[in-house]
Amino acid sequence: MIRCGFSVRLSADDSVENQDEEYFFIEMNGNERRIRFHDYEEIYKIPGLYEHLFYDRLRCESPQVVADLLENEIEETPRSMSDLKVLDLGAGNGIVGKVLNKKGVNSIVGVDIIDEAAAAAKRDRPGIYDDYLVEDFSDIDDNLRNILEKNKFNCLTCVAALGFNDIPSAAFANGFNLLQENGMVAFNIKPDFVEDGDSTGFAYLIKEIVAEDILELKSEKRYCHRLSMNGDPINYVAMVGMKKAEIPEHVCREL
Ligand SMILES: C[S@@+](CC[C@H](N)C(=O)[O-])C[C@H]1O[C@@H](n2cnc3c(N)ncnc32)[C@H](O)[C@@H]1O
């Protein structure tokens, strides 16, 4: 992958309380500017910046950890990784697709809400996705749903994308409902967002679908997702489960 000439300066700011408000400085062509960590449009436009920031500097482990956990579970079933038809929700510039592809998955459709993500995936990891849709997955119409159902997805991945005003619970529920029965679901999230009292709706969704045997949780792993700006570990939980039924309308309406 081509990397543009830039240098990144990280500077911890104690006034920043939330992970999605963190920012960094980038110097390119003699100019320095500030970019928020969650300003993905700007980050994806610069080849190599997302990888340098989150992977080289902040040691993000999530795509590998989630894919490894998924692979371990697949080994417990008669299926193999090459049988998976994956819907990668919040696919970004394709890092998860690439990790899955290395593990033998050769059917992956990516979805992201911004054009810059689709363009970066095509630019940086060509050939990894069979198709890449730019859609707000929290609001998909029947026409798109009918088209996507033809893919007969048997795996949903959603990595480093839930919580913090990223992918809403409704988008996750839409992806989940597109899976075939017994399809695998692999995702990660900050534990606060799955514990009681969380306001994003994800805690409610997970509690409800596990209690109703809609999602059978198979395994989970607590690990360091990445480092914070001051070098402290940010711990997440990776989860893998199996879809047993559709999420009903009344649960979706609450999200
Ligand atoms: C932190 S990135 C993760 C990218 C990739 N999964 C990875 O692990 O490198 C989160 C992505 O979710 C996308 N996203 C946020 N809301 C979305 C929505 N409603 N529908 C689809 N994608 C969304 C963002 O544009 C962003 O590219």
Image (spheres, rainbow, N blue to C red):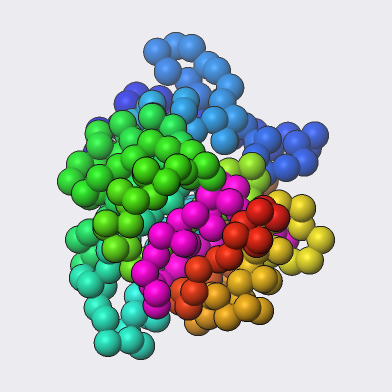
Visible residue check, residue 93? no
Residue lying at 60% horizontally and 48% vertically, measured from the top left: 168
Quadrant where the N terminus sits is: top left
Residue lying at 45% horizontally and 68% vertically, measured from the top left: 185
> Is 178 one of the magenta-colored residues?
yes
Marks counted in the figure total: 0
User: Depth check: 119 or 31 in front?
Assistant: 119
Residue lying at 42% horizontally and 18% vertically, measured from the top left: 28
Residue 182 position, x and y percent, is: 39, 77
Residue 189 shown left or right of residue 112 in the figure: right
> Is 191 one of the magenta-colored residues?
yes
User: Depth check: 3 or 139 in front?
Assistant: 139
Which image quadrant is residue 80 in? Answer: bottom left
User: Depth check: 239 or 215 in front?
Assistant: 215
Residue 144 position, x and y percent, is: 37, 44
Which residues are the magenta region? 167-193
